[in-house]
Amino acid sequence: MQLIDTHAHLASSRFVEDLHQVVEAANDEGVHHIISISCDLEDCDANQQLAKEHPCVSATAGIHPSYVHEFDERTGYDDLQRHLEVGSFVAIGEIGLDYFHPPADDSPLEDWKRLQKRVFRKQLEIADALSYPVVVHQRSSFEDTLQILREFPGVKAVLHCFSEGPEAAQQALDLGCYLSFTGNSTFKSAEQIRQSIGICPQDRVMVETDSPFLAPVPFRGKRNSPALVTKVAEQIAQCWGIEVSSVAAATTENAKRFFRGLPVD
């Protein structure tokens, strides 16, 4: 059985001391590839270096909505585009909208939302121009996120850490999005997430850890790592009533189809 963890933050400071062991442990559990996700331009450089050092790691480049207040729009878009044109990135991300957390710069909420929307749209324009898929973060912002994605029908999108109910899942699927599920699908309180998994066609689902965050049961509260994406696959297998090996095969093929130039046989 082989799995791809499609969303991990390997550049996180929580992996500094033992990253090599974390990657090895994932490989030992059958996780043969990891997508390391960027949140700002500094992450883009760090993840690109990690991908060079570890053949089983690929990198994305993008500006997370919670980091837009630190992003210099005068030069940042050109910098991001240069990264994407010369690097070996497999997607733009993570990008999107986050209305759950308060404004990081203490600005008025509506100004914060407008800034996030502007940066989100601009990155989607870059994705459209350069033919990159996008990894989308949406929290307490589902309707606005889908509304903006509708403006870019040519851009492939995955809604990462999908935590909405089945009605929202169907809206996203109808728009052509992929849905990616993480460790919170194993939480006792996550029945609506499991219902969403249940309605998803097998060719539109991916698995992720979002590590070091959202460790699955029975590791909840501890540092998450790519090796634990197996627990997410097991949860999806239960929801679909199939073998875990079939989930692994389906989600791996989906990841290979979604990400750009993923170096996976």
Image (cartoon, grey):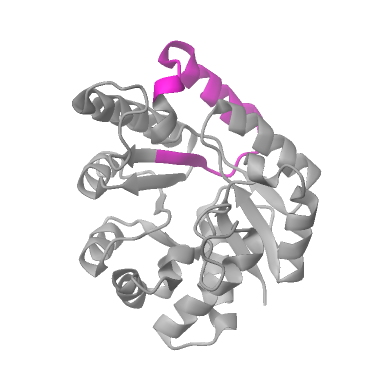
- Name the spot of residue 121 as percent of width and height, x first: 33, 31
Residue pictured at 69% horizontal, 53% vertical? 263
Q: Is residue 94 above or below residue 191?
A: above
Q: Is residue 100 magenta?
A: no
- Name the spot of residue 64 as percent of width and height, x first: 44, 35
Residue pictured at 51% horizontal, 65% vertical? 220
Left or right for 172, reference 9: left
Residue pictured at 20% horizontal, 66% vertical? 167
Left or right for 152, reference 130: left
Can residue 14 be seen here? The reply is yes
* Closer to the camera in the image, 75 or 139: 139
> What span is colored magenta in the figure?
69-95
- Name the spot of residue 54 as percent of width and height, x first: 78, 48
Q: Is residue 125 above or below residue 246?
A: above
- Which quarter shows the N terminus? bottom right
- Which quarter shows the C terminus? bottom right
The outermost residue toward the front is 221
Left or right for 235, reference 162: right
